[in-house]
Amino acid sequence: MESCRLRPMRLRSDCLVIGSGIAGLSFALERADSGTVTVVTKKATAESATNYAQGGIAAVMAPEDSFEAHVADTLRAGAGLCDPAVVRFVVERGPPAIERLIELGVRFDRHETCATDYDLGREGGHTQRRVLHAADFTGQEIERVLVERCEAHPNIRILANHMAVDLVTSRKLGVDGPLRMAGAYVLDEARGEVGVVEAPVALLAAGGCGKVYLYTSNPDIASGDGIAMAYRAGATIENMEFIQFHPTCLYHPEARSFLISEALRGEGATLRTAAGEAFMARHDPRGDLAPRDVVARSIDHELKRSGDDCVFLDCTHLDPAFLRRRFPNIHERCLGLGIDLTKQPIPVVPAAHYCCGGVATNLDGETDVANLFAAGEVACTGLHGANRLASNSLLEGVVFAQAAARCVRERTDLPDLPAIPDWDSGDASDPSEAILVNANWGEIRQLMWNYVGIVRSDKRLARAARRIQLLQDEIRQYYWDFRLTPDLVELRNLATVADLIITAASRRRESRGLHQNLDHPETDAEARPTRLRALS
């Protein structure tokens, strides 16, 4: 009964962080020495896309490498849409960011023959070895250290199993003037109650939106929550048409969302058709080390040509002992499914992996909502352009988290805003038909895979636009009629993000990077971003 419900949570903090990956936790640690930080994360603290990152983090750490080379590789992969100033900003801050992670306790692999040097890997699109790693579970090692540090810090409060529902801005509080951050409504998943976290500054670090597609390498949490909330709050969303499909996800009925790291190709693994033919050389002169967009499209082309279900990544010509030592996680996972990668090729297919667009930010990581920052996959900083260079994502997350923390430390003129009112459920009742949520979720993912995938067309995009509009109408009604559950909040966000991707893809009348349209195969001479903002 209503009278028996506990009073919803109400907290106040100097900073609110939404998300607990490398960007969110790095910001929390940098900020907590001069203020209180509340971290909201919808599952366990360590459950983040960072935790699943296998390959590593790219930075110029070898004497034969250079900032110029890393900048050039990033710009080349980004297909003309990167912001050169941002690329240089991130690349030049790469080594200090790595040193900060090492200072916190992250253990990157050292070279076998020289313990003072790091064992640097190479991945597609890189002209040098510059990828630091911890075997093939780099993200897990980084996440381990950051979680331990944050949990031990007296100024950091972590709300696990809590889900941000909506950001609250000055406009929602009826305050005139510039759009400013005030806090967020947060769902306590265990109690089913929506509470309030008031904070004059917030960092969105909620990750990407891979679950908008039927096949993805992403964990279940990647439902585009941060992008959808920022859009509803009035922030500009940029370049959502550029969804990176990782070329090599394990193809096996028992292998759910398991990534086969690009670092295997960096060490010499070869992509082959089911007939055993190596095919990448005929698609790109860089062969198996071409950037991800090229490799994913090439695999897609080969599968459509042959009618096969998958292609194969062949490592059998490489030293077995090296493979077991360098890729223990992948080796063990494949072995558990009956695939010995030292003796037989690995079946792989492309799957949605990374959103190169997101919430538009400046070099401080700030959005066009004052005091709302964004870092990591949720953000569109200008680094990735039309296609992300492998292993630049973890680097971007930590560099912009540090930049945002520096900016916030220097900001002393934060305005006082009225208190955020309690969440009003109105006449909403407890949800009675979860099947409706599941059915809509499944339909969104299927239509995005069918119509807004690796290769697109005007007709496919028009079909997707019509269907997503109908689904959003259904979801909107269901959202306001029933009490909130995590599944319902995620469904609402997923539909919003799907609509943003479809709208952005429909507006780009060319093919560039990750966006390939059969009706517009040429690339325009001038690269322009796609910017979307909610009508207010």
Image (cartoon, rainbow, N blue to C red):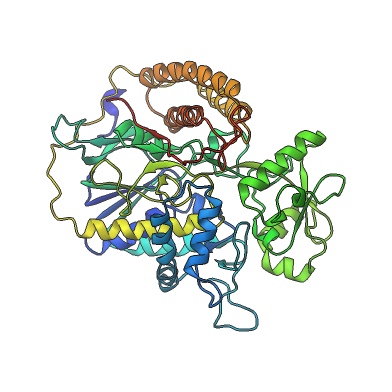
Locate the C terminus and report the quarter of the image it occupies.
Answer: top left
- Residue 395 % position (x, y): 46, 60
Q: Height in image: 265 above or below 507? A: below
Decide which of 115, 355 is in the foreground and name it: 355
Q: Residue furthest front?
A: 525
Residue under the image location 31 percent in, 25 percent down: 535
Is residue 375 among what the camera can see? yes
Is residue 254 among what the camera can see? no
Q: Height in image: 152 above or below 271? A: below
- Residue 230 % position (x, y): 34, 37
Decide which of 285, 8 is in the foreground and name it: 285
Q: Which residue lies furthest to the right in this view?
A: 275
Task: Classify residue 361 as left or right of residue 330.
Answer: left
Total numbered labels: 0
Task: Classify residue 128 as left or right of residue 499.
Answer: right
Residue under the image location 31 percent in, 37 percent down: 235
Residue under the image location 61 percent in, 33 percent down: 521
- Residue 391 % position (x, y): 54, 58
- Residue 369 % position (x, y): 26, 40
Task: Classify residue 137 as left or right of residue 487.
Answer: right
Locate the N terminus and report the quarter of the image it occupies.
Answer: top left
